[in-house]
């Protein structure tokens, strides 16, 4: 009975080692595929416009725009009369009411 248990334990150990070896080979193959893929050149994509590396390519002229051009001073002022504003925004009165 003891010999049978030893034989069975040895078979399980051998199968586990074989499984680990199989996963190791798979990991090595995956690493090799990734390495080869990383080293291959990327196919060139056609550009939408002129080649940016061409120093003679025509480009639109630059125009200066001030970053503070739309600025308007917002200094505090005295309040204005609100009666006319209130009358304009009030709902129209109903006839006969």
Image (tube, grey):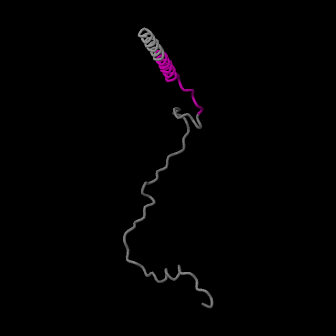
Q: Nearer the viewer, residue 16 or 28?
A: 16
Residue at 55%, 36% in the rendered image: 57
Nearest the camera: 29 or 8? Answer: 8
Q: Position of residue 83 (x, y in %)?
A: 47, 83
Q: Is residue 42 magenta?
A: yes
Residue farthest to the bottom, as pictured: 96
Q: Which percent across, then down, holds residue 86?
A: 49, 81
Query: At which x and y percent is residue 91?
Result: 56, 81
Q: Where 71 sits versus 58, above or below? A: below
Quadrant, the N terminus: top left
Image label count:
0
| 67 in relation to 80, above or below | above
Residue pictured at 41% horizontal, 10% vertical: 2
Image quarter in which the C terminus is found: bottom right
Identify which residue, 67 or 26, lies in the foreground: 26
Instruction: Please tell me whether residue 32 is drawn above or below residue 67 in the rendered image.
Output: above
The magenta region covers 21-46
Q: Residue 96 at what x, y percent from top left?
A: 62, 91
């Amino acid at each position: 009975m003891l010999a049978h248990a030893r034989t069975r334990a040895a078979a399980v150990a051998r199968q586990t080692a074989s499984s680990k070896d199989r996963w190791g080979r798979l990991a090595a193959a995956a690493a090799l595929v990734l390495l080869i893929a990383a080293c291959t050149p990327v196919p060139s994509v056609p550009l939408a416009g002129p080649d940016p590396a061409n120093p003679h390519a025509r480009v639109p002229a630059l125009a200066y725009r001030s970053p503070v051009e739309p600025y308007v001073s917002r200094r505090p002022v005295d309040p204005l009369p609100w009666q006319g504003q209130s009358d304009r925004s009030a709902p129209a009165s109903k006839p006969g009411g």
